[in-house]
Image (tube, rainbow, N blue to C red):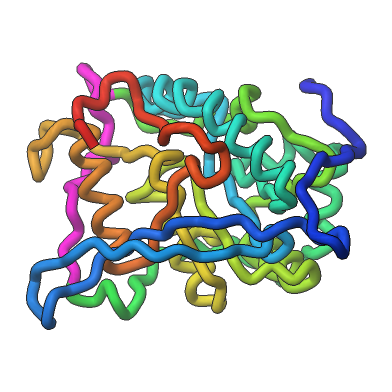
Amino acid sequence: MKLFLLSLSFLTLTTGDNKPAKVTFTIQKRIAVNGSDKYKIVKETRQWEPSETAIIICDMWNQHWCKGATQRVAELAPQMNRVLNAAREKGFLIVHAPSDCMEFYKEYPQRKTALKYSTPQDEYIEGNKLLPAEANAKWPVDQSNEGCNDTPRCEVRSPWKSQIELLDIKGNDIISDSGPEMQRLFKDKGVNRVVLMGVHTNMCVIARPFGMRSMITSGKEVYLMRDMTDLMYDARAYPYVNHFEGLGLMVEYIEKFIAPTVVSTDLTGQPAFRFKDDPRKN
């Protein structure tokens, strides 16, 4: 079992009252032009209190049923780990949420902390219900075949046992895949803003019990870190574009109908992450 830390002292920029300094983020959203079906990108600068902000890492499993998805998670994870380290130093709460893997972490103190906010009545309810803003929106990609782009397509199964080990779990982090646990923990800690990263935008990131829709419905201010995510999409299906163009379409959908997005640059000062096979220029 991977070693974990019981405690950690963070080197954090602070204000005069020993409170972590606010962090500047540029948020991006898409707004309909004069009620038409055309949208324009709008960017705004926000100052965030780290103590009021949590980052949720969605389903970055050690193995996915799709080989291509597993490979992209392994490519994304090292850069994500650098982003998480930068966020910790600035005072953000980090929540590891590898669904279906809580048994693996039952002895971790980070899991035991989350369990303090659990109740016997808690249910695991996916957040599949559309938000009001999505009522007349067209879903951008066909994922009816579960989105595997490999040839031959991989067999759908559940091989994951834990989060990928390329992501560190440190002392003040939390481990949970429960929406109710997170909601109570966030209320106790004064967290009113969440940033989702991980996989996959068109499935788990949006629809898990701790996903974007559920967090928005519960009243949280929600964002997607758009360079720290991926898509389950088969390029042989609608809209018949390459995988990364499909990811871009999904991010556009989120910015139009679900929540604004941010990039990791605002935490790291480094260029946004790009997958090595991504042919897009922007």
Q: Which residue is outermost to the front?
A: 16
Where residue 232 sits in the image (x, y, percent)? Answer: 31, 38
Of residues 14 and 181, the one nearer the viewer is 14
Q: In terms of image quadrants, where is residue 114? A: bottom right
From the viewer's perspective, tell me whether residue 60 is left or right of residue 255: right
Residue 120 visible in image: no
Q: Quadrant of the C terminus?
A: top left
Q: In terms of image quadrants, where is residue 124? A: bottom right
Say which residue appears at 63% left-offset and 51% top-offset. Answer: 177
Say which residue appears at 19% left-offset and 38% top-offset. Answer: 245
Q: Quadrant of the N terminus?
A: top right
Above or below residue 193? Residue 145 is above
Above or below residue 25? Residue 36 is below
From the viewer's perspective, tell me whether residue 76 is left or right of residue 167: left
Q: Is 143 contained in the magenta span?
A: yes
Q: Main secondary structure of the magenta part?
A: loop
Of residues 125 and 198, the one nearer the viewer is 198
Residue 132 visible in image: yes
Above or below residue 166? Residue 190 is below
Span colored in magenta: 137-153
Of residues 41 and 111, the one nearer the viewer is 41
Where residue 198 sits in the image (x, y, percent)? Answer: 49, 41
Say which residue appears at 78% left-offset and 67% top-offset. Answer: 189
Where residue 244 sits in the image (x, y, percent)? Answer: 24, 34
Of residues 214 and 65, the one nearer the viewer is 214
Say which residue appears at 69% left-offset and 65% top-offset. Answer: 52
Where residue 214 sits in the image (x, y, percent)? Answer: 50, 68
From the viewer's perspective, tell me whether residue 189 is left or right of residue 247: right
Q: Is 258 contained in the magenta span?
A: no
